[in-house]
Amino acid sequence: MFVNFSAMPTSFLFSFEDYVTIRAERNFIGLDNYTNVVSNPSFHAALRNTLVFAGVRVPIVTVLALGIALLLHSIRRAKGLFRMLYFIPFVTSGVAIAWVFKFLYLPNFGLFTYIFDTLKLPRIYFLGDPRTALMSIIAVTIWAGIGYYAIIFLAGLEDIPEELYEAAMVDGASAWQRFRKITIPLLNRTLVLVIVLALISSLQSFTFVRLMSKDGFGGPLSSTLTMPLLIYKEAFFSLQMGRASAIAVIFFAMVLIATLIQRRLLVREFEY
């Protein structure tokens, strides 16, 4: 699910109205929608889960994608084949991936349960336990998106002149020193791009949460309820378009501020 920024002015106006979908009239109510939203425990749970989702997923997917990109960059044979294999999950339908992993997570018939039973380990109720449900979904989204970010990193790596590495090797620089002094500085713009894209996709994650949560609405016990899912729930099931718009405006501000802060902190200019 992606935020439609072109619709934000309309959502902003709706957020100040008592807008119920099945009712024709709409009245201006000021900040009442924002007050109701902020005082709602579901909003607090959704905000917390969304921040955890992004806080866990972004660093893991960034590090793993960079590692995979470095491995792909070092391969001399069958480059195209290996790149395709890593990219396949990203171009596969998110709905299909969500249903497959939901089946694999089944407590009685799933593959993971079978592996745990074979190894005589205690069962983990991945999607049925509030302590593990969100992390189980995050793991799937990492697997599904890692190839995309790896390809972006790979493009950045191939843009770094080989002469710099050759000169560093002549000077006796170790592999770690070359990575720290050459690769990371000259990969800065690509790194910022990947982090920003991963952050936005993490904050906006909807498909996997909607299809993999126990009841489809953030269960169990709101442990997988996220901001996009809460917007969907308020707008299309509670029919409270005004409240949904207020949440959307708050969510838009979160994404915008987080993106600007990251860009401010991470962008560095390097010349070679």
Image: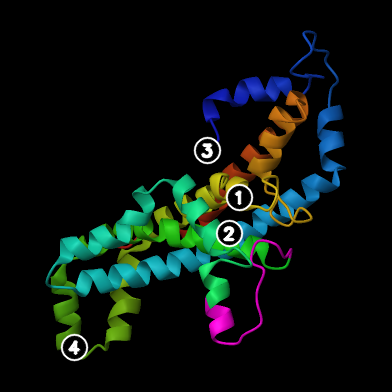
The residue lying furthest to the bottom in this view is: 172
Q: Is residue 65 above or below residue 173?
A: above
Q: Earlier in the sequence, mark 2 or mark 1?
A: 2
With respect to residue 165, does 202 lie above or below?
A: above
Residue carrying label 4: 171
Query: From what the image shows, is residue 73 above or below residue 127?
Result: below
Question: At label 2, which amino acid type do we have?
Answer: Ile
Q: Determine the CA span between mark 3 and mark 4.
A: 48 Å
Q: Pointer 1: residues within 10 angstroms few (<14), some, or many (20+)?
A: many
Residue occupying the point 51% across, 51% down: 99
The answer to whether 231 is drawn above or below residue 9 in the figure is: below
The image's colouring method is rainbow
| CB-based contact (under 8 Å), mark 3 and mark 4 | no
Q: Residues within 10 Å of mark 4 (few under 14, many from 20)?
A: few
Residue bearing the label numbered 1: 209
Circle 1: residue type: Val
- Please tell me which of labels 2 and 3 falls first in the chain: 3
Front tag of 2 and 4: 2
Disc nearer the start of the sequence (3/4): 3
Q: Which of label 1 and label 4 is nearer to you?
A: 1
Label 1, label 4: how many angstroms apart (C-alpha)? 51 Å
User: With 196 as the anchor, is 210 left or right in this view?
Assistant: right
What type is the residue that disc 3 sits on? Phe
Tell me the amino acid under the disc marked 4: Asp
Which picture quadrant has residue 66? bottom left
In the rendered structure, which disc, 3 or 1, sits on the residue that comes first in sequence? Answer: 3
- In the picture provided, is 125 more to the left or to the right than 73? right
Magenta-highlighted residues:
115-130
| Residue drawn at (21%, 60%) of the image | 159
Which residue does the numbered mark 3 point to in the structure image? 2
Q: Earlier in the sequence, mark 2 or mark 4?
A: 2
Residue at label 2?
137
